[in-house]
Image: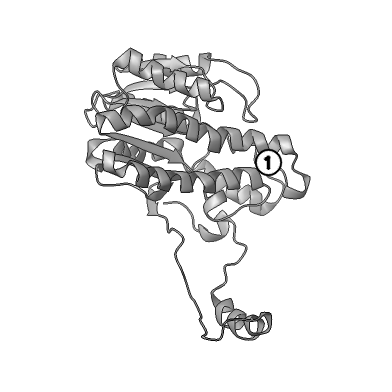
Amino acid sequence: MQQGNFVKDKVVLVTGAGGGIGRDFALALGREGAKVVVNDLGASVAGEGRDISRAQAVVDEIVAAGGTAVANGDSVADWDAANRMVTQAVETYGRIDGVINNAGILRDRFFFNMSVDEWRAVIDVHLNGAFYVSRAAAPHFKSQGSGSYVHMVSTSGLIGNLGQANYSAAKLGLAALSKSIAMDMAKFKVRSNCISPFAWSRMIGSMPTETEEQKARVVRLQRMETAKIAPLAVYLVSDAAADVSGQIFAVRANEIFLMSQSRPLRGMHTEEGWTPQTVAERVIPALKPNFYKLDRSQDVFDWDPV
């Protein structure tokens, strides 16, 4: 692959980079001159098992193409392990410039059947893990007066989806965490942004295909390659994105969207104050035309990818 210079000599830690979207991030960063810490626990989609060979295989690809990378097999869901991966970046390359929180697992189940363990496991990786790694890098970013976080979120949280209460809650929480980081770290010139990806990967490869609707959705997803997400991620950790922070982007094949963030939509007031009866009689009828439906991601993004 031809070497570029868009993030030349930037040191970037990518979690969950042993396959799928994370692997493409690591490869793209390597192509563009970054020094990449390729983190992957080597677990199954459900978060079981451990195998650093997946991370090492990506490192080998980057190095074979003329890039620079090192493997890390720590778990993002462990505070000490998160600190070790940041320390490895600093000790190996002298600094850290970017963190891409991409590691994830799935434990899909309808809310009324979801176990406490299934809830905790997903929250631990997606939300706690992103906090641990981000917090571990924060002192380095703060002291050097620069740095970029990129967090992978999902329309399952931003919009909604069935059977993913744990994943949806974690991903929407991560969007809020990113905004807080962006605000708290702004005076140190540190940025934090989110990407909500549409792509066919190992994470969603176990989706059911029992109905015609499900089969059609899988066909659409299979046309959205994981590599299509990487250019935006590389841009966000580069100096070219110095004034981009606190935003949520979505990438769907060749489409890039800026997602909305919660703001007041409509309101009513009264000098007398409200009672349950006047809420029922006046407020709800006035606001109801603007109520949101129980939409899923595919109900909102219902056209074929470009």
**Res 140 visible:** yes
In the image, residue 87 above or below residue 236: above
Q: How is the image coloured?
A: one colour
Q: Position of residue 245 (x, y in %)?
A: 32, 46
- In this view of the protein, which residue sits in the foreground, 61 or 41? 41
Q: Which residue is mark 1?
A: 108
Task: Tell me the element at label 1.
Answer: loop
Q: Position of residue 51 (x, y in %)?
A: 57, 15
Report which quarter residue 49 is drawn in: top right
Q: Quadrant of residue 95?
A: top left
Q: Amino acid at mark 1?
A: Asp
Residue 230 location in percent, x, y? Answer: 38, 36
Q: Decide which of 229, 88 is in the foreground and name it.
A: 88
Image quadrant containing the N terminus:
top left
The answer to whether residue 206 is left or right of residue 63 is: right
| Residue 301 drawn above or below residue 51 | below
Residue found 35% across the figure and 22% down from its top: 36
- Name the image quarter holding residue 242: top left
Q: Residue furthest right?
A: 113
Residue, x 43% and y 44% (percent of image)?
178
Report whether residue 205 is seen.
no
**What residue do we see at 44% from left, 15% from top?**
71
Farthest residue toward the front? 272
Image point 57% across, 32% down: which residue? Answer: 125
Q: Is residue 204 left or right of residue 188?
A: right
